[in-house]
Amino acid sequence: MITIYHNPRCSKSRGALERAQQFAAQHAIELEIVDYQKTPPTLAQLQALHKILQSESPVSVRDIVRDGEEAYALLHLDQADDDALFAAIAAHPVLLQRPIVSFKGRGIIARPPELVDRILTA
């Protein structure tokens, strides 16, 4: 199964979703679309997702945080440790970087959307 943490208002997320949908259709693979703002991931799910992202290259917790969001500044996350960052994302899902795609134990932040192709292999 391919899973995408998706924000339908984000053009990069829509682009990655389109690529994932095409691949899933071509290979008869189930696609799970998680609108993470409507269905926020739990702290445990975020930690597991972060671990999956390590499959392609080192990814810090800070890399999965959107630091341009108002909540980032309001919560003073610029010096936060990993535990505080995970807790902030769990409480304020708008802070989760997007899109994040996982498949077969591999994961990637698909910015730009073409990066998703690195993990989509039959």
Image: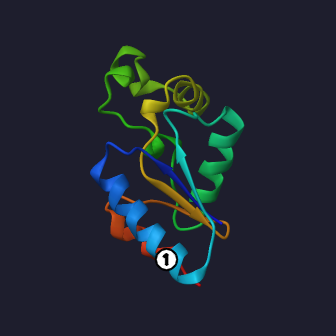
Camera-side residue of 52 and 83: 52
- Tell me the residue that label 1 is attached to: 23
Q: Which image quadrant: the C terminus? A: bottom right
Q: Which image quadrant: the N terminus? A: bottom right
Q: Which residue is farthest top?
A: 74
- Residue at 39 percent of width and 65 percent of height: 18
Q: Position of residue 88 (x, y in %)?
A: 53, 25
- Residue at 62 percent of width and 50 percent of height: 49
Q: Secondary structure at mark 1?
A: helix
Q: Position of residue 62 (x, y in %)?
A: 46, 40
Camera-side residue of 12 and 26: 26
Q: Which residue is farthest right?
A: 44
Q: How is the image coloured?
A: rainbow
- The amino acid beneath tag 1 is Phe
- For the residue carrying disc 1, how many other residues have a C-alpha within 10 Å: few (<14), some (14-19), or many (20+)? some
- Residue at 67 percent of width and 66 percent of height: 105
Where 86 sits versus 14, above or below?
above
Q: Position of residue 42 (x, y in %)?
A: 66, 33
Q: Position of residue 79 (x, y in %)?
A: 43, 25
* Numbered label tally: 1
Q: Is residue 33 left or right of residue 77?
A: right
Q: Is residue 115 left or right of residue 121?
A: left
